[in-house]
Amino acid sequence: MNNWIAYAATVLGLALVVSGWFLWGDQSQTDIFALNIAVSVVAYIVMFIDILLPWGNFREKTQRRIGNLAMRWFVQYGYSLAAIALLIICNLADLTFEVSLFLQCGLLILLLFGIATAKTSGNKIAEVSEEISHVVDCVQLMRNGQDSLLEAAYDASAPAELIEKIKRLGDDLRFISPSNSEASRNVENQIIELFAQTASLLSNYEINNELINSNIEKASRLIQKRKSTYSN
């Protein structure tokens, strides 16, 4: 319902802009009159486009539109205000249609450059956000792997000493911060794979107990190694 109200208000405002020119605008020069209407309509649409388009897609994790609002608003409102100011100046100075059209087209080109720059900035924001999200996911995957390993140890009725070792792994993982370095990523993948492998071995603890304990010790060393790696 609110969307329809916004659309209706936008259309009514646009109708007022156009009708205002027909009621009070100078129609003696048809080409100048048409240019005035065209510039006013474009400036109006650019200024109020955010009423018709959502500021952001809240299902999108990167939220590139929200993160790029300042740049977009600068381009939008900067163009709209400059276009109206230039329109007034051209009319007051009684410039020819050709000169007025040339200046407005130049301003329109600047708008297009601004839109392209804002889009590039938005894409960069999305890339950085996705990278950060992936880094955080890797840390969470390690913690999830330790949780699964601990559950497998309980299900296998593993010795209390082994369960304590696995719990200590979880305590160590709490102090790991996300890192975007390749070295960190490699160590994280090794830890995740080691947790999964060890959890599967626990189903036959009596047979695999030496390998399980060896994997736990290796996981502990890898976690310590991961703590010493930092972001680029």
Image (tube, grey):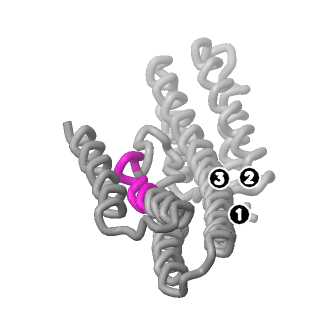
At numbered mark 3, what does the secondary structure look like: helix, strand or loop? helix
Marked residue nearer the N-terminal end (3 or 1): 3
Q: Main secondary structure of the magenta part?
A: helix
Disc 1 from disc 2: Cα separation:
8 Å
Image mark for residue 89: none
| Residue 66 picture location, percent across and down | 46, 56
Residue hosting label 2:
184
Q: Which mark is residue 231?
A: 1
- Tell me the kind of residue under disc 2: Ser
Coordinates of residue 145 in the picture (x, y in percent):
56, 33
- Pointer 1 with pointer 2, Cβ within 8 A: yes
The residue pinned by badge 3 equals 123
User: Visible in this render: residue 23?
Assistant: yes
Q: Amino acid at mark 1?
A: Ser
Seen at 41% across and 70% down, the residue is 26
Q: On the picture, is 181 further left or further right than 115? A: right
| Image quadrant where residue 113 sits | bottom right
Q: Is tag 1's residue or tag 2's residue first in the polypeptide sequence?
A: 2
Which residue is located at x 72 percent, y 34 percent? 214
Query: What span is in magenta?
Result: 44-54
